[in-house]
């Protein structure tokens, strides 16, 4: 009985240069095929369900995951900027209340009700600021995890 010939696709030490990485000698899909995708590295058509490009052995699955991660990161950064823009007017009002509190101490120290009005306004503003601040911290944490 003769031993099987184990000469595979890469029998020659230089076959990977000549034959590329198309180990199974797959034919590329037609351009109009629904499962045809363009490889991110060699930009040739390859099959959607393969893990690697049939031409250059580029890891398509890992590239798709990386693209998804980058999209999520971009979306989270956009949301973070929106939250910061939403928080800005409340912070300006809080600073104005703090200035008003200090000024009332010097201008009208004999009217204690003014302090309570300004402190009440600051407490109401803090009630609006706290949930926004929590959302900002949560979004920043999600961004750190995706990096």
Image (cartoon, rainbow, N blue to C red):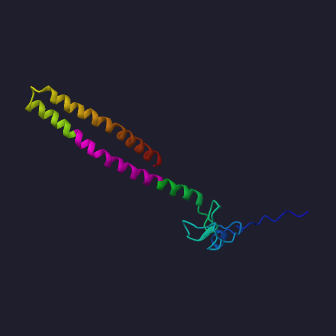
Image height check: is 75 above or below 38?
above
Would you say 96 lies left or right of 59 here? Answer: left
* x 51%, y 55%: residue: 68
Would you say 120 lies left or right of 53 here? Answer: left
Q: Is residue 59 visible?
A: no
Q: Which residues are magenta?
A: 72-94
The magenta stretch spans residue 90: yes
Q: Residue furthest right?
A: 1
The prevailing secondary structure element of the residues shown in magenta is helix
Expressed as whole percent of the image width and height from the top left, the position of residue 110 reads 9, 25
Expressed as whole percent of the image width and height from the top left, the position of residue 22 reads 67, 68
The magenta stretch spans residue 81: yes
Nearer to us in this view, 46 or 122: 122
Image height check: is 40 above or below 116?
below
Expressed as whole percent of the image width and height from the top left, the position of residue 30 reads 65, 74
Expressed as whole percent of the image width and height from the top left, the position of residue 42 reads 56, 69
């Amino acid at each position: 009985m003769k031993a099987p010939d184990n000469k595979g696709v890469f029998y020659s030490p230089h076959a990977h240069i000549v034959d590329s990485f198309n180990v199974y000698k797959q034919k590329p899909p037609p351009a109009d095929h629904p499962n045809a995708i363009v490889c991110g590295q060699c930009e040739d058509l390859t099959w959607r369900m393969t893990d690697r490009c049939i031409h250059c052995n580029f890891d398509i699955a890992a590239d798709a995951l990386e693209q998804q991660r980058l999209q999520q990161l971009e979306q989270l950064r956009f949301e973070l900027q929106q939250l910061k823009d939403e928080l800005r007017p409340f912070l300006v009002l809080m600073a104005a209340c703090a200035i008003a509190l200090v000024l009332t101490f010097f201008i009208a120290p004999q009217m204690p009700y003014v302090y309570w009005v300004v402190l009440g306004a600051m407490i109401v503003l803090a009630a609006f600021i706290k949930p926004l601040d929590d959302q900002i911290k949560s979004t920043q944490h999600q961004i750190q995890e995706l990096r």
